[in-house]
Image (cartoon, rainbow, N blue to C red):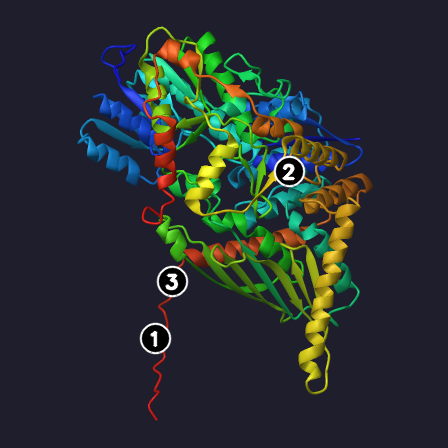
Amino acid sequence: MLRIAIIGCGKIADQHLLAIQRLADCEVVALCDRETLMARQLGERFRIANVFGDATEMLGSARADVVHITTPPQSHFTLARQCLEAGCHVYLEKPFTVTAAEAAQLVNLAANRHLHLTAGHNYQFTPEMCRMRELVAGGFLGGRPLHLESHWSYDLGDASYVGPMLGSRQHWVRQLPGQLFHNLISHGIARMAEFLDDEVEVVARAFQSQHLRQLGGAEVKDELRVLLRDRLGTTGFFCFSTQLRPGPNQFRLFGPTNSLVVDLISGSLIRCRSGNYKSYLTYFVPPLRSAGEHLRNSLRNVRDFLSGRLYQDSGMKQLIELFYQAIRANRPPPIPLREILLTARIMDEIFGQMGAATPPRPAEPQLNLSR
Amino acid sequence: MPASSVIPDHRCLVTGASGFIGVQVVEVLLKQGEANLRCFVRPSSRMKRLQEVIHRYDAENRVDIVAGDLLSRDDCRKAAADTTVVYHLAAGFDKSFAGAFMNSVLTTRNLLEAFREVGRPGRFVNVSSFAVYSNLNLPRGALLDEASPLEDSPQERYDAYAFGKLKQEELVRDYGQKQGVPFVILRPGTVFGPGKRDLTGRIGVDTFGFLLHVGGRNQLPLTYVENCAEAIVLAGLKPGVDGETFNVVDDDLLTSKQFLKAWKRRTGRRFSVRLPYFLAYGLCALWEDWSKRRKGQLPPAFNRRRCAAEWKGNRFTNRKLKERLGWQPRVGMDEAMEAFLSQFDPATS
């Protein structure tokens, strides 16, 4: 039986507890929040008696095997280091750390102490992402991915998050180097990191949407476009937007033969196969095949829902389950540490370029329409 | 509406002052000549309506506006400095339990602490909600008043707002008993009026793309926003009611069928599907059981407790409010409905 503790009793802690409750052979033995009232309310709702206001005290008395850290990112490094030094395996919510240097220190510390460490990139473990991984491993793309596209969106209509963040320069999101992006883009970057080599060239541009400007967004930027290219020539495009509707959450992989589209909003995996069709069949057959793919996904989701396999946040449960299995069997963690470090490095680079002076806009092309 | 103050030379603080009820509370206070008024708002608040009220009463010099976050202890100290009466209307509408708790309880704790430390605590008026009650074990048609049972399982009701409000009330009582902060708790029913266009959930649900009208004969605990604001102001100024709790509902309450009929006639929206209460209860019970069996695969958004709380149909009373605070609903139900519905007229829209 694994003994689990959670540090940070805000909104995301509920999701962790619900996911852990679905798993066998583990028990949440302690909760901790600097704001003891928060720890108490969570303990009361989930019937967990041991609540603490201090992480040191909790680590000293709870004898936890694994600690989930679900606090704001600024405290991730210090708390994770403290937990690793206390001999606990650590599940660290996204963004893993504030900087890549901190991420590297934690990875080294975990390796030196033979402890497991993972990042809260749970969207990489949704059913459709897992099926995508199986197809890629089975050679569906016809080789390694040549181009990746990751679209991630966020709705500024969530006033409970955006209101306080825009209202105060002291809000923890505003204190991060990448501000709004820092807290939101990890998932979209991490899934690209899985298919990229360690050396990646990054070109990033960030700007503020008209919508955010109207909301009084001050210096906060909410639109981000990133181009990536690794040493092996795989290219990538990342788009974060608060404006696009319907808000996309998609990952596309293009190979030399076929390509895949993972749509995390609808829980779909679309296989796009190359094919040469004669004449007008080009217009008739591919749309039918595409419709068949969508129908297949829909039926699969209905079946999985009725059989109890499909539920919200299944990615988190899957990641936690695999992480615990890795701990028990002393196997490599579900997310290779290389990917966590690469994600952190790419994010560092993006935020570094955001801070740099915006290059002058190219002159408008002069079109000569006269004949 | 004369009211004698608990403390002479008092200074009032209104939190959530730019909100739907908050603006009306400020208006009532200015109307009765309040000389020292502080309004606490979020920096991101829409200030237009509040500023219009202040301007209408030529009160720019009498009203001090403080922008901040009640989760910040420093901001709370700025808000509470030298105040004698706090009208705490700021509310957390976060859908998550943790968020609702944080925005209801931690904010209230910070404000109470600041009130003790840098205020002159005369009275803390805590604006709560009818959501704190549980009528699960009350028969249909039974009277729900201040002595009725409170919800003992908001998690099971899947009602984060009720959870936050229940815990907020607990905290205020605790500060009253242990720290000696005088308090009054008000529980408004369904507050309506111009500026709030949504139909109350007590009429039905529109989750499925159309309006499912549940029940019909159930009385709505309505209170018109101006009447509600006057009750809140009285609760801060009336002597001899410390530690009391008051429900706020108007006279001549409408049933959900009457309310919906008037709303449909005025908005031109005609389509809704009626679902009898017993059938709604059965469906909610099935949903709840499925959710439990499947460990939350479906969130228990529909359940027995919520069904009872929203649609069971109880009677409500404002007798205590009238007897102890001397409150009378100044705006009658017909006039209130006309004011509410007029916002849907094409010219107004």
Residue B324: quarter of image? top left
Pinpoint the chain carrying mark 3: A
Q: Residues within 10 Å of mark 1 (few under 14, many from 20)?
A: few
The residue identified by callout 2 is A15
The residue identified by callout 3 is A358
For the point 59% across and 20% down, the residue is B135
Q: Is residue A176 above or below residue B334?
A: below
Q: Nearer the viewer, residue B122 or A238?
A: B122
Q: Secondary structure at mark 1?
A: loop
Determine if marks 2 and 1 fall on one subunit.
Answer: yes
Left or right, residue B323 beside residue A342: left
Three-letter amino acid code of the residue under disc 3: Thr
Q: Secondary structure at mark 2?
A: helix
Of marks 2 and 1, the one in the foreground: 2
Q: Nearer the viewer, residue B90 or A109?
A: B90
Q: Which circle's residue, 2 or 3, is located before the other in the chain?
A: 2
Say if mark 2 contacts mark 1, CB within 8 Å.
no
Residue B83 visible, this angle = yes
